Image (cartoon, rainbow, N blue to C red):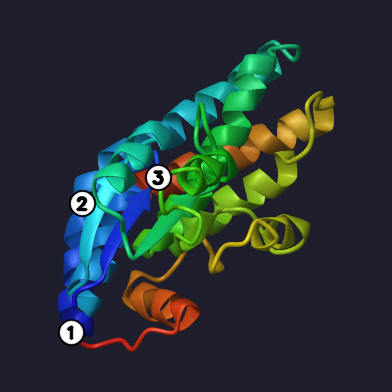
């Protein structure tokens, strides 16, 4: 049963992976926007919401490394509505690493 | 009797992987809802044995949806398990305090999800 279920989860991952990749890219783009326009509260809200979503989803499909990166990013930005330059920079770098990890997982 | 389970989550990927885990491992009957309104509609038509309810959803979140389900005819004792991507701590306690059967953190292992839900509800898992 475990092997059969693992195969089914892997097949399902292939089905949902393009949407996860699109979400990771959207998150990365939002993090870049926050760097360019620090007062863009909408973009910062996107960073928080998309990191939260990916943290919950990626790990449930066995994408442990990418899921952990999303969780790290979510922890980093949680509770902050007006990030300073250092936080914006860390968030952008982490979002880029996450996007790359998801791209690798999808490849 | 085969348990009838409602999964409420705005993320289709989560709904699909929950369905996969519960159907393949436990043989439960699973129905999905992508929003609070859809969940109310499903429960109004056929009462599920348990609702797996995402906490963070746009428009109406998990706790707001729980209140709507509780207000339905026969909804007061509806069994609900929250799904949340939030970490342990105050948030989890706050969710427990809403009178649910349990809280499951995302990410979860789809292979053990049915067992985890069954344990929370005191059900025997037939595989």
Tag 2, which secondary structure? helix
Mark identifier at residue A10: none
Residue located 24% across and 44% down the image: B45
Q: Nearer the viewer, mark 2 or mark 1?
A: 1
Q: Which chain's residue wears label 3? A: B
Q: Position of residue B86 (x, y in %)?
A: 63, 53
Q: Nearer the viewer, mark 1 or mark 3?
A: 3
Q: Is residue B88 visible?
A: yes
Q: Which chain's residue wears label 2? A: A
Structural crowding at the residue carrying mark 2, measured as other residues with C-alpha within 10 Å and reported as few (<14), some (14–19) or many (≥20): some
Structural crowding at the residue carrying mark 3, measured as other residues with C-alpha within 10 Å and reported as few (<14), some (14–19) or many (≥20): many
Mark identifier at residue A1: 1
Q: CA distance from mark 1 to mark 3?
A: 26 Å
Marks 2 and 1 belong to one chain: yes
Seen from the viewer's position, the closer of residues B69 and B24 is B69
Decide: is B29 above or below B67. Answer: below
Mark identifier at residue A14: 2
Label 2 vs 1, first from the N-terminus = 1
Residue located 38% across and 65% down the image: A62
């Amino acid at each position: 049963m475990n092997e059969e279920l693992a195969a089914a989860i892997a097949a399902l991952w292939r089905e949902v992976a393009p949407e996860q990749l699109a979400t990771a890219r959207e998150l990365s783009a939002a993090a870049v926007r926050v760097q360019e326009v620090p007062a863009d509260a909408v973009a910062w809200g996107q960073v928080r919401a998309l990191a939260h979503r990916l943290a919950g989803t990626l790990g449930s499909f066995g994408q442990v490394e990418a899921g952990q990166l999303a969780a790290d990013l979510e922890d980093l930005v949680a509770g902050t509505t007006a990030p300073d330059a250092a936080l914006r920079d860390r968030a952008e770098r982490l979002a880029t690493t996450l996007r790359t990890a998801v791209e690798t997982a999808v490849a | 009797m085969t348990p009838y389970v409602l999964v409420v989550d705005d993320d289709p990927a989560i709904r699909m992987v929950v369905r996969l885990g519960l159907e393949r491992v436990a043989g439960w009957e699973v129905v999905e809802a992508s929003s609070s309104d859809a969940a109310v509609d499903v429960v109004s038509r056929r009462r599920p044995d348990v609702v797996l309810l995402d906490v963070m959803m746009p428009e109406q979140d998990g706790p707001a949806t729980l209140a709507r389900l509780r207000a339905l005819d026969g909804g007061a004792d509806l069994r609900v398990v929250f799904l949340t991507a939030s970490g342990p701590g105050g948030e989890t306690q706050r969710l427990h305090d809403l009178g649910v059967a349990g809280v499951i953190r995302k990410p979860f292992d789809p292979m053990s999800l049915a067992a985890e839900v069954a344990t929370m509800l005191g059900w025997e898992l037939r595989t």
